[in-house]
Amino acid sequence: MPRVVHFEIPVDNPERAVKFYTKVFSWKIEKWPGPVDYWLAMTGDDKEPGINGGLTRRSEQMRAVTNTSEGTSLDDSIKKIEANGGKVVTPRMTIPGVGYMVYFEDTEGNFSGAMQMDKAARWLA
C-alpha cells in the first residue's frame, strides 16, 4: 500500500516560516542547494515513525497543504503556536483511541493539525 513519505508546505516568507516551524516543533530546516528555492524539513529521528518534507515558495501550482504534526503535549503545542504568530482555528478535539488534536493556521496562512497521541483517549460523557 502506498504511504505518504514527504510533504510540502507553500510559503510566502520562507525565513518567517522556518522560524515558526523550528520554534513550534523543533524541526531542523535547511536550504536545499539545488537550482530552486526549497527548504528541507527534517521532522525527527529517521529511526522513528514519521515523514520529512519541505517548504517551497507559494505559487499557482503550490497553494495549500494540510498535514498533522505530533507533539508530546497538545497544550504546549497550542501555547507555542500562538506565541509564534499562529492561530488555533478549532477547539481541542478528542479522537477516541488515538489522542487529541487541534487545527491551526501558521504564519503563512496554511491549515495544519497538531496532535498528542493517547490510546486511552475517550469521548467525555
Image (cartoon, grey):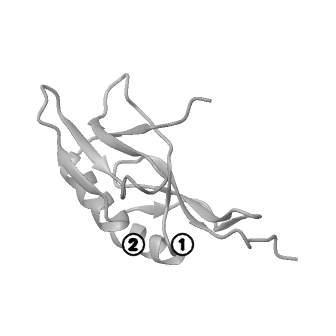
Label 2: how many Cα within 10 Å (few below 14, some 14–19, many 20+) = some
The percent position of residue 9, horizontal first and vertical second, equals 37, 41
Q: Which residue is mark 2?
A: 80
What is the residue that sits farthest to the front in this orientation?
47
Question: Could you tell me which residue is drawn at 36 percent across and 58 percent down?
Answer: 45
The percent position of residue 38, horizontal first and vertical second, equals 22, 36
The percent position of residue 104, horizontal first and vertical second, equals 50, 57
Question: Could you tell me which residue is drawn at 54 percent across and 72 percent down?
Answer: 74
Q: Which residue is mark 1?
A: 74
Quarter of the image that includes the C terminus? bottom right
What is the residue that sits farthest to the top in this orientation?
61
**Which numbered marker is on residue 105?**
none
Sequence-wise, which precedes: disc 1 or disc 2?
Answer: 1
| Left or right, residue 31 beside residue 67 | left
Q: Secondary structure at mark 2?
A: helix
CA gap, disc 1 and disc 2: 10 Å
Question: Could you tell me which residue is drawn at 62 percent across and 29 percent down?
Answer: 1
Residue 35 position (above or below residue 108): above
| Left or right, residue 105 beside residue 12 | right
Question: Could you tell me which residue is drawn at 79 percent across and 71 percent down?
Answer: 122
The percent position of residue 47, horizontal first and vertical second, equals 41, 55
Q: Secondary structure at mark 1?
A: helix
State which mark lies toward you, 1 or 2. Answer: 1
Front one among 67 and 104: 67
Front one among 70 and 10: 70
Front one among 19 and 1: 1
